[in-house]
Amino acid sequence: MDHTPVYLITGATGGIGSTLCRQLMAQNASVSAISNNLEKLNHLAQETGVHTLEADVRSYESLEQAVTKTHEHFGRLDGVVNCTGSILLKPAHLTSVEDWNNTLSLNLTAGFYLLKASIRYLKKTPDSVKSVVFLSSAAATTGLKNHDAIAAAKAGLNGLVRSAAATYAPQGIRVNAVAPGLVETPLAEKLLSSPAALAASERLHPLGRIGQPDDIASAVCWLLDAKQSWVTGQIIGVDGGLAALKGA
């Protein structure tokens, strides 16, 4: 690759998204960081030098504008990553309709919107190994109690990955996902609020620890890299062995 790759990251101010921005900037990539939190975006820009755009990923029009502005700013688009998501740990009978709709919106619909908005620009980019990466979850393939809504949303995302990988392979666009276990981020703070809760979460993962944002961001960087030009349609577990071993 003889050009500077341009990547667009949604959910860029979250624990994983901000770490991914740092890793990509350290690799001399150009990054467009998308979030609805302007204060955190400004802080991230000052720290890393990323290009920032405020957008609501739950609105297709808002997200489409951010993708278009990214392409206008950099003149190309080599890859997009959907780091937007949420955590909801409730059984179905205690999950409100609002909770369900919010979970689907942030964990499935936002991913579909990003794919839909970015494909035309990815197709236009010459001399590039183009990549779309989603963040799924070990819960999508492993039966974990009280994960009913989030497991359904992420399982839908896995289906989107595989279908879109087949659809866009002729255009050289790769579509994959990274499926984490529990990761130490602000989003998971309530789940790790006590030593007992932390110890229980560590025991859940065969490798005996919860994940760190660097673990996930590194896997995403690997999938974005042009050297992985023969990898598509994959859901790669980066979860301390949770899905493959606990779910076996």
Image: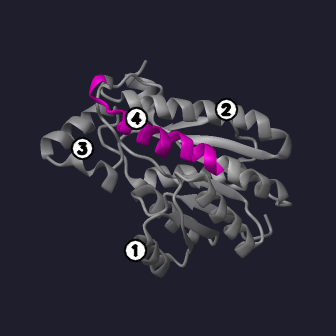
The label number, if any, that marks residue 100 in the structure image: 4
The label number, if any, that marks residue 39 in the structure image: 1
Q: Which residue is mark 3?
A: 191
Q: CA distance from mark 4 to mark 1?
A: 28 Å
Q: Amino acid at mark 4?
A: Trp
As helix, strand or loop, the secondary structure at mark 1 comes to: helix
3 vs 1, front mark: 1
The label number, if any, that marks residue 162 in the structure image: 2
Q: Is residue 55 above or below residue 95?
A: below
First of labels 4, 1 by sequence position = 1
Q: Amino acid at mark 1?
A: Glu
First of labels 3, 2 by sequence position = 2
Question: What is the span of residues highlighted in magenta in the rendered image?
Answer: 93-114
Residue 141 visible in image: yes
Q: Residues within 10 Å of mark 1 (few under 14, many from 20)?
A: few
Q: CA distance from mark 2 to mark 4?
A: 24 Å
As helix, strand or loop, the secondary structure at mark 4 comes to: helix
Residue 47 x, y percent position in the rendering: 45, 78
Q: CB of mark 3 within 8 Å of CB of mark 4?
A: no
Q: Residues within 10 Å of mark 2 (few under 14, many from 20)?
A: some
Q: Nearer the viewer, residue 160 or 234?
A: 160
First of labels 3, 4 by sequence position = 4
4 vs 1, front mark: 4
| Horizontal side of residue 38 vs 233, given as left or right | left
First of labels 3, 1 by sequence position = 1
Residue depicted at 64% across the width and 69% down the height:
29
